[in-house]
Amino acid sequence: MPGRTKPLLATLNGRNQAIKPIWLMRQAGRYLPEYRRLRAAKGGFLELVYNPDSAAEITLQPIRRFGFDGAILFSDILIVPHALGQDLAFETGEGPRLSPPLADFDLAALTPVPERLSPIYRTVEKVKAALPPETTFLGFAGSPWTVATYMVAGQGSKEQADARRLAYRDPARFSKIIGAIADTTVDYLSGQIEAGVEAVQLFDSWAGSLSPTQFERWVIAPTAQIVSRLRDRHPHVPVIGFPKGAGGKLGAYARETGITAIGLDETVDPLWAARELPDGLPVQGNLDPLALIAGGEALASAARRILSAFEGRPHVFNLGHGILPDTPIAHVEQLLELVRQ
Ligand code: CP3
């Protein structure tokens, strides 16, 4: 039973651990000097993602330095639009650009390039071969809604207005986009699992921008579909859902999607979550990334409050969102000490 020696996997499978496992969203990235060095040497972000040796090395960097309980695959949620046939570029300081944007072009204008997913599976195999036995290997993808916001606008967008507009104005067309993303996501996550990841996370970074009925339709329904199709193929692989900003809709998300564990952002009160979410449902989160930047007593008291609220429930310690590039390494070390006593 691998779960016995892997505290993070055991937690996701519902077994509460006395010492809570910890990993940090975006733990492979710019706050690490060794990442910045490799990125400067190898060129752009996408070059790193599509080079299995570099991507495997970056996945392992935070494990070597901190010994986190989970290693998250170094890749990006926008690899799926790339495989669906959009051009993808990351301009330094400007964020991602995807073209053509689906606000102006039909999905039928794209020619899928599924081979773009293959190097990611090679990365998974390389990491798998090098990972310590107690470390759980996490794969991931974006949720259809969050990925669609980028595909429609062609870039990051304020309040995701283009995608929300399209979803109201032409739900049939928007539904085709969501369906195409969901299909590719199921294949992509299955590919990651077959190559060696042990659990997967669905990042829904923009779940918070939808009204309740749109949330049901574009977040809950496609997530439930992905979970059920993944379970058909890989019944025992935990799926962590992270609907950032969902607030009062977290309960419905937890009950209706079938996810194995739920990620909480830093705006969720852990005492509320401990009380209101389904009994025994594993939770993940939810330290404010800015408390980690602050360090000291601000960090200690914020971390303790979360640990104490989730003492009686399977809990994976994490941030409420990705670690910020200006986070001091010493504060990550302080946090690890706090969580592991
Ligand atoms: O968590 C990890 O360490 C694994 C790798 C990972 C990255 N992106 C690497 C990355 C993961 C899980 C993601 C998820 C992701 N990507 C999300 C969902 C989570 C979130 O943060 O909301 C989103 C929305 C994206 C899309 C994306 N990727 C944007 C908007 C940007 C530009 C803004 C930014 O943060 O730089 C990226 C680039 C990106 N993805 C970087 C990294 C390490 C920075 C690349 C660099 O400049 O070196």
Image (cartoon, rainbow, N blue to C red):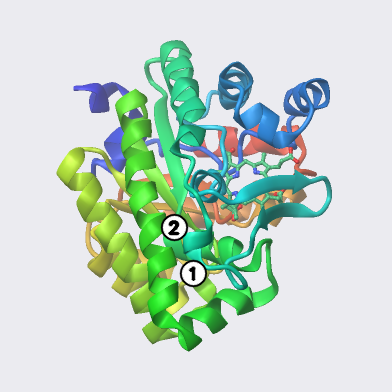
Residue 297 x, y percent position in the rendering: 70, 50
Residue 156 vs 52, above or below: the answer is below
Q: Residue at x 33, y 61 (%)?
A: 223
The local secondary structure at tag 1 comes to helix
**Left or right: residue 5 compared with residue 58:** left
Report which residue position mark 2 lands on. Answer: 143
Task: Depth check: give the residue in front, 192 or 132.
Answer: 192
| Residue plotted at (25% across, 28% down) | 3
Q: What residue would you read off at disc 1?
A: 207
Three-letter amino acid code at the position of disc 2? Ser
> How many discs appear?
2
- Determine contact: label 2, label 1, CB under 8 Å: yes
Specify which label sits upstream in the sequence, 2 or 1.
Answer: 2
Circle 2 packing at 10 Å, graded few (<14), some (14-19), many (20+), is: many
Q: Which mark is residue 4?
A: none
Residue at disc 2, secondary structure: loop
Residue 180 place in picture, x, y as percent: 39, 58
In the rendered image, the vertical position of residue 106 relative to residue 136, given as above or below:
below
Residue 249 in sight here: no
Establish whether ligand 1 lies closer than 8 Å to the Cβ of label 1: no
Q: Residue at x 58, y 68 (%)?
A: 105
In x, y percent, where is residue 29? Answer: 68, 35
Residue at position x 49%, y 55% from top? 306
> Where residue 93 sits in the image (x, y, percent)?
83, 50
- Is disc 2's CB within 8 Å of ligand 1? no
Q: Quadrant of the N terminus?
A: top left
Whether residue 225 appears in this view of the structure is: yes
Locate residue 224 relative to residue 104 in the image: left or right.
left
Give how far apart the Cα atoms at labels 2 and 1 are. Answer: 9 Å
Q: Within the image, what quadrant is residue 249 found in?
A: bottom left
Mark 1 belongs to which amino acid?
A: Ala
Report the mark closest to the observer, 2 or 1.
2
